[in-house]
Image (cartoon, rainbow, N blue to C red):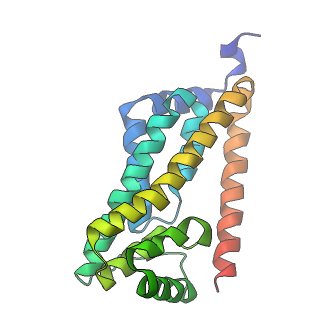
Amino acid sequence: MSDNLRDSRLHRRAARLARSQWGTALAATWGFAEAVSWPVLPEVALAGLCVADPKSGPRLSVAAAAGSVAGGLTSYALAERGVVPPCPLTTRRMHDTVATQTRDEGARAVRHQPLAGIPYKVYAVRAGQERVGAMSFAQASARARGTRIVTAGLALTAFGVAARSQRHRYGPYLLTTGTGFAAALTLIVRGWR
């Protein structure tokens, strides 16, 4: 069976998007939006795009990470001026934990974010409110947040290479990934109540 017959139409469209400038813009914008208010991680977009076109994975991963750090700096700047964007799917306990970490560690508090399950935007807002230093926060964010997004994107890229013969199952893969993300998000929010 030829590759085109085994490839799903959805996969082909996603791969075209991943290869285009629009795919890069989508990854960067998603990262930015999630760092300001959007409740869905940029890794969700990468899960679709990097698997669809693994050759684009490194570029998309870097774009998502850069967009995220830029969004974090935007949240920081807004909070520094007293404007707090909506932070959906966050809890009072998350905010209190980040307040304590930021008070104790300054900009370095964001290093807890990748494993804590607390959205990055909460760290960005608190850092701005505490005025920990935009440059310090950007550097700490690039190390913690940027590294995590790029690592996840590269892992998804590797998965896309390994699953190349399963392109005809791309639709079920997206459904499973979306369901898994929704379940994980629900557990995280419940765990922080």
Quarter of the image for residue 155 reads top right
Task: Depth check: give the residue in front, 116 or 184.
Answer: 116
Q: Position of residue 102 (x, y in %)?
A: 43, 82
- In this rendering, the answer to whether 120 lies above or below 24 is below
Quadrant where the N terminus is found in the figure: top right
Task: Depth check: give the residue in front, 53 or 70.
Answer: 70
Task: Depth check: give the residue in front, 135 or 39.
Answer: 135
- In this rendering, the answer to whether 110 lies above or below 63 is below
Q: Is residue 58 left or right of residue 188?
A: left
Residue depicted at x 36% and y 42%: 25
Q: Position of residue 135 (x, y in %)?
A: 28, 66
Residue depicted at x 59% and y 32%: 52
Q: Position of residue 81 (x, y in %)?
A: 22, 81
Kindly tell me whether residue 8 is visible in this rendering: yes
Q: Is residue 113 left or right of residue 85?
A: right
Kindly tell me whether residue 53 is visible in this rendering: no
Q: Position of residue 178 (x, y in %)?
A: 66, 53
Residue depicted at x 69% and y 80%: 191
Quadrant where the C terminus is found in the figure: bottom right
- In this rendering, the answer to whether 2 lies above or below 109 is above
Residue farthest along the top direction in this orientation: 2
Q: Is residue 37 left or right of residue 166?
A: left
Residue depicted at x 26% and y 75%: 78
Task: Depth check: give the residue in front, 142 or 188.
Answer: 142
